[in-house]
Image: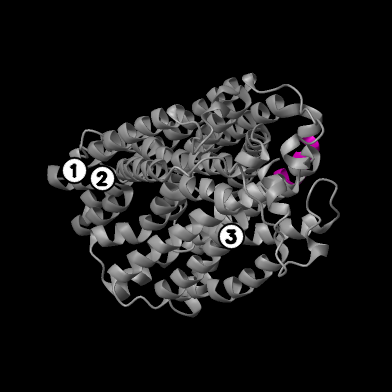
C-alpha cells in the first residue's frame, strides 16, 4: 500500500472531511488546495526579489560592510537552495503538509526578526531563517500538487497556474519593495509577510491534505546533511563567480571543489543504500533527466540576462528602479499567459514540441533585443520581452510537468526538490557565466581611452557604474570621453551576451528532442489511487 494511502487513513479531526476529497476522483476542492499552494509560492517568490530595491535604504540605516551587505542579499537564496533536498525528502517521510506548515511558521518568525533587525548581523540571521522557511515551502507545494492532481491533464493545468504565480511573484517583488520603501521604511518589505502567514497557518492546516511517501527503512540523516553541505558549498562558489571573482580564486574554487566532492559522495551513498534518500533511478528516465537539464539551461540563459538588462535600463537609458520594473512587466504578463494556456498546448503539441518551441521563441525574443542601442526603443523592448516571457514560461512549465509526471506520488517531494534545486543552480550559474561574458566584452573598450589615466581606466573597466563614478571624478573632456566609451562598450557587451544566451537556448531546444513526443495521459498510477 502506498504512502499516500497510509496518510489518508490518518486524517486528523482538525481537517473537515468535506475538504479531504483531493484524491483521484475528488471534487472541486482540489482547486481550493491549489489556491492555497499558489499563495504559499507567491510569498516565497516575492521575498526572493523584494529586498533588491531596499538595499540602498538598508545600507544607509544599518551601515553594513561590503561582505555583510553581500550576505544580507545572498543568505536567503543560498540557504534555501542548500536545504531543498533535505526538506523535500523529509516531507516525503514525516508529511508534506506538516513540513509546509512548519515552513509558514519559520517564514513568519524570520520576517518579524528581519523587519526589526537593528544590526547587519541580525538581518543576515533573519534572511538565513527565511531561506529555511522557503526551503520547506517550495518543494512541499509541488509535491502536494502532485498528490491532489493524479490526472495528468488536470495536473498540467495546475502546474501552469502554479508556474504563472511564480512569474508574478518574481516581478511583483521589486515593485512592492519600491512602494513600501518609498512610503514606509525598509523593514516593511518583511513585515508585510506577517498577516499573510497568520492567515496561511490555520487555513493551510484546515484545507491541505496530509500525505507521505515511502516510509520503508530509516530516513538517511547523514545523506540529507551531505546534500545540504555539498549544495551550500557549490552554490556559494557559483555566487562568488557571479560577483566577479574568477574560478581560479582560492575562496571561489575551494567551495566549488568541496561541494562537488561531497555531492559525488552523496550520489555514491544513495546508490549503495537499500532505501535511498533520493531515487536516483529517476535520472535513468530521459523525460526526467532532460527536463531537469532544460530547467537549468532556461534559467542559466535568462537570469544573468535579466540582471544585465536591468543595468542597461537604469545606467544606459537612465530609467529609475520603478520605471525599470514597469518595463519588465510585459515579460511577466507573457509568462502568465503561457502558464494559463500551457496545459492545452501541451496536450496538443506534446512535451518535445512544447519545450523545443519554448526555447526557440525565447531565443528569438533574446535576439530581437540586439537591435537595442544607446537610445530608448520602447516598442522593441516590449515586443522582445513579450516573446521572451511567453517562450521561457512555455519551456519551464512543460519541463516541470514532464519531470513531475515521471515521479510517483511517494517520491514527489524528492523530485520537486530536485527541480527546485536545478532552478536555483541554473540561476546562479547563469549570473556567473553571462556576467563573465559581459565583463570580457566590456573591459577592452574602456581599458585604454585617449586622455584617461591608466588607473582610472582600470577602475572604470570593473563595471559601468564604476565607470560613471570615475568619469565624474575626472570631469572635463577626459571624463566625457570615458563615459561615452563605457556606454558604447556596455552596449557591445550586452549584444555579445544576448548572442551567447540565444546560443544556449538553441542548445536547449536540441536537447528537448529527446523528450516524449506526445503527452501520455494514462490512468493514475497505483501510488495515487490505492
Asked whether residue 414 appears in the rendered view, the answer is: yes
**Circle 3: is it few (<14), some (14-19), or many (20+) Cα within 10 Å?**
many
Indicate yes or no whether the magenta region holds residue 350.
no
The mark found on residue 462 in the picture is 2
Select label 3 or label 1 by which is in front: 3
Q: Residue at x 22, y 57 (%)?
A: 475
* Image x and y of residue 278, in percent: 51, 36
Q: Residue at x 59, y 75 (%)?
A: 198
User: Which residue position holds label 3?
Assistant: 98
By secondary structure, the bulk of the magenta-drawn segment is best described as helix
Q: Residue at x 56, y 24 (%)?
A: 506
Q: Based on the displayed image, in which of its 4 quarters is residue 469 positioned?
A: bottom left
Q: Nearer the viewer, residue 470 or 208?
A: 208
* Image x and y of residue 126, in percent: 38, 67
**Circle 2: is it few (<14), some (14-19), or many (20+) Cα within 10 Å?**
some
What is the C-alpha distance between the residues marked 1 and 2? 7 Å
Is 279 situated left or right of 231 in this image? right
User: Which residue position holds label 1?
Assistant: 458
Q: Are marks 1 and 2 in contact (CB under 8 Å)?
A: yes
Q: Which residues, given as a range, are shown in magenta?
A: 337-345
Q: Nearer the viewer, residue 283 or 158?
A: 283
Instruction: In the rendered view, tell whether residue 32 sits above or below residue 280.
Output: below
What is the C-alpha distance between the residues marked 2 and 3? 47 Å
Amino acid at each position: 500500500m502506498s504512502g499516500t494511502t497510509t496518510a489518508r487513513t490518518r486524517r486528523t479531526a482538525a481537517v473537515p472531511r468535506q475538504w479531504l476529497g483531493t484524491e483521484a476522483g475528488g471534487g472541486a476542492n482540489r482547486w481550493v488546495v491549489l489556491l492555497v499552494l499558489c499563495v504559499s509560492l507567491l510569498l516565497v517568490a516575492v521575498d526572493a526579489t523584494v529586498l533588491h530595491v531596499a538595499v540602498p535604504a538598508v545600507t544607509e540605516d544599518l551601515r553594513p560592510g561590503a561582505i555583510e551587505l553581500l550576505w544580507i542579499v545572498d543568505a536567503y537564496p543560498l540557504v534555501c537552495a542548500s536545504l531543498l533536498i533535505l526538506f523535500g525528502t523529509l516531507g516525503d517521510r514525516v508529511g508534506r503538509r506538516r513540513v509546509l506548515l512548519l515552513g509558514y511558521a519559520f517564514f513568519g518568525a524570520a520576517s518579524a526578526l528581519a523587519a526589526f533587525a537593528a544590526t547587519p548581523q541580525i538581518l543576515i540571521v533573519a534572511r538565513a531563517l527565511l531561506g529555511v522557511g522557503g526551503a520547506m515551502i517550495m518543494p512541499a507545494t509541488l509535491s502536494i500538487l502532485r498528490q491532489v492532481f493524479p490526472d495528468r491533464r488536470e495536473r498540467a493545468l495546475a502546474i501552469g497556474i502554479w508556474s504563472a504565480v511564480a512569474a508574478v511573484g518574481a516581478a511583483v517583488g521589486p515593485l512592492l519593495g519600491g512602494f513600501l520603501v518609498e512610503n514606509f521604511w525598509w523593514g516593511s518589505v518583511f513585515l508585510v509577510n506577517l498577516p499573510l502567514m497568520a492567515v496561511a497557518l490555520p487555513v493551510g492546516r484546515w484545507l491541505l491534505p496530509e500525505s507521505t511517501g515511502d516510509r520503508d527503512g530509516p530516513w538517511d540523516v547523514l545523506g540529507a546533511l551531505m546534500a545540504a553541505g555539498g549544495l551550500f558549498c557549490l552554490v556559494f562558489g557559483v555566487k562568488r563567480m557571479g560577483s566577479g571573482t574568477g574560478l581560479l580564486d582560492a575562496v571561489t574554487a575551494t567551495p566549488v571543489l568541496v561541494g562537488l566532492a561531497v555531492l559525488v559522495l552523496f550520489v555514491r551513498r544513495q546508490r549503495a543504500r537499500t532505501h535511498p534518500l533520493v531515487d536516483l533511478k529517476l535520472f535513468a528516465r530521459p523525460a526526467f533527466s532532460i527536463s531537469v537539464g532544460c530547467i537549468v539551461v532556461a534559467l542559466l540563459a535568462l537570469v544573468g540576462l535579466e540582471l544585465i538588462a536591468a543595468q542597461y535600463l537604469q545606467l544606459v537609458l537612465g530609467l529609475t528602479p520603478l520605471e525599470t520594473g514597469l518595463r519588465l512587466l510585459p515579460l511577466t504578463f507573457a509568462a502568465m499567459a503561457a502558464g494559463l494556456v500551457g496545459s492545452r498546448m501541451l496536450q496538443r503539441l506534446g512535451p518535445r514540441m512544447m519545450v523545443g518551441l519554448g526555447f526557440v521563441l525565447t531565443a528569438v525574443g533574446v535576439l530581437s533585443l540586439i537591435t537595442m542601442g544607446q537610445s530608448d526603443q520602447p516598442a522593441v523592448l516590449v515586443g522582445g520581452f513579450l516573446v521572451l516571457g511567453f517562450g521561457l514560461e512555455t519551456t519551464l512549465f512543460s519541463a516541470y510537468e514532464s519531470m513531475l509526471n515521471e515521479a510517483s506520488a511517494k517520491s514527489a517531494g524528492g523530485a520537486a526538490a530536485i527541480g527546485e534545486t536545478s532552478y536555483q543552480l541554473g540561476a546562479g550559474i547563469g549570473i556567473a557565466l553571462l556576467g563573465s561574458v559581459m565583463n570580457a566584452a566590456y573591459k577592452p573598450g574602456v581599458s585604454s581611452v585617449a586622455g584617461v589615466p591608466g588607473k582610472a581606466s582600470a577602475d572604470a573597466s570593473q563595471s559601468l557604474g564604476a565607470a560613471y563614478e570615475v568619469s565624474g571624478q575626472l570631469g572635463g573632456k577626459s571624463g566625457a570621453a570615458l563615459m561615452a566609451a563605457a556606454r558604447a562598450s556596455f552596449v557591445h557587451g550586452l549584444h555579445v551576451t544576448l548572442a551567447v544566451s540565444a546560443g544556449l537556448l538553441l542548445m536547449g531546444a536540441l536537447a528537448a528532442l529527446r523528450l516524449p513526443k506526445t503527452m501520455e495521459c494514462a490512468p493514475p498510477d497505483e501510488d495515487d489511487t490505492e
